[in-house]
C-alpha cells in the first residue's frame, strides 16, 4: 500500500489564562485552556491523525496525561515524536488539513504561522499543510465558548 489515511479530533475546555496554544502559536485570548500539556488542540488532533494513519494508537497512549514528564509540555514535542515514528516506518505526511472549531479567538490571522511551524516540524512543504477555522454558529459547547475543538485528517505517503 502506498498511501495511508488518518483522522483526529481533540477538545479542551477553556479555563484560567491569557492565551491558547494553537498549531504551536501563542494566540492571545482572555481565557486559557484546561490541559495537562499546553492543550494545543490543533497539534493534538494532527498527532492523532498521524498515529491513526498507521494504526499506532492515540496520543494518550504515547504521552499519558498522568505522566509528569508531559505536564505543561510543548505539543510540538509530541508532533515531532509522531513524525519520527512514521518516518522510521518509511512514511511521511503527504498533506494534512486541520479545522479549528471555536467562536473566538480568531484563528485566521495566525493560520499561516501555524502552517509554517507544522510544516517545519514535519520536514515538508508549507503548501502541504492546511489550517482553517469555523464557528459552530453559537450552538453547542464551542458555540457557548466553553471550549475549543479541532479536527484533522492526514494522508501519509511512502517516504
Ligand atoms: Mg488534547
Image (tube, helix red, strand yellow):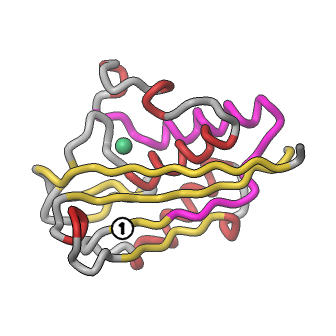
Quadrant of the drawing holding the N terminus: top right
Label 1 sits on a secondary structure element that is strand
Q: Residues within 10 Å of mark 1 (few under 14, many from 20)?
A: many
Q: Is residue 84 on the magenta stretch?
A: yes
Image location (x, y in percent) of residue 115 = 55, 64
Q: Quadrant of ligand 1?
A: top left
Check mark 1 vs ligand 1: CB closer than 8 Å? yes or no: no
Q: From the image, which quarter does the C terminus lie in?
A: top right
Q: Residue placed at 75% from the left, 36% from the top? A: 87
Q: On the rendered structure, is 94 left or right of 150?
A: right
View extreme (right): residue: 1
Q: Is residue 97 magenta?
A: yes
Please identify the residue farthest to the front as the structure is shown: 140
* Residue 128: % across, % down: 69, 65
Residue that appears at 34% across and 19% down: 67
Q: Is residue 139 above or below residue 150?
A: below
Measured from the top left, where is residue 29 in percent x and y? Answer: 20, 65
Residue numbers of the magenta segment: 72-98
Residue 157 position, x and y percent, is 81, 50
- Note whether 131 is above or below 73 in the view shown: below
Q: Which residue is at a point 36% across and 21% down the rendered structure image?
A: 69
What is the total number of numbered labels drawn onto the structure image?
1
Q: Is the residue 145 above or below the residue 57 in the image?
A: below
Mark 1 = which residue? 101
Amino acid at each position: 500500500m502506498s498511501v495511508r489515511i488518518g483522522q483526529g479530533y481533540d477538545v479542551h475546555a477553556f479555563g484560567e489564562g491569557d492565551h491558547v496554544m494553537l498549531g504551536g502559536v501563542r494566540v492571545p485570548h482572555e481565557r486559557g485552556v484546561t490541559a495537562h500539556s499546553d492543550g494545543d488542540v490543533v497539534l493534538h488532533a494532527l498527532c492523532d491523525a498521524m498515529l491513526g494513519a498507521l494504526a499506532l494508537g492515540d496520543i494518550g497512549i504515547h504521552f499519558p496525561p498522568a505522566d509528569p514528564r508531559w505536564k505543561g509540555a510543548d505539543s510540538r514535542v509530541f508532533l515531532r515524536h509522531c513524525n519520527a515514528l512514521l518516518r522510521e516506518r518509511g512514511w511521511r505526511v503527504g498533506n494534512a488539513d486541520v479545522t479549528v472549531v471555536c467562536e473566538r479567538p480568531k484563528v485566521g490571522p495566525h493560520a499561516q504561522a501555524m502552517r509554517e511551524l507544522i510544516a517545519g516540524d514535519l520536514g515538508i512543504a508549507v503548501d502541504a499543510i492546511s489550517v482553517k477555522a469555523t464557528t459552530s454558529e453559537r450552538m453547542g459547547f464551542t458555540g457557548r465558548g466553553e471550549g475549543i475543538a479541532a479536527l484533522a485528517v492526514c494522508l501519509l505517503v511512502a517516504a
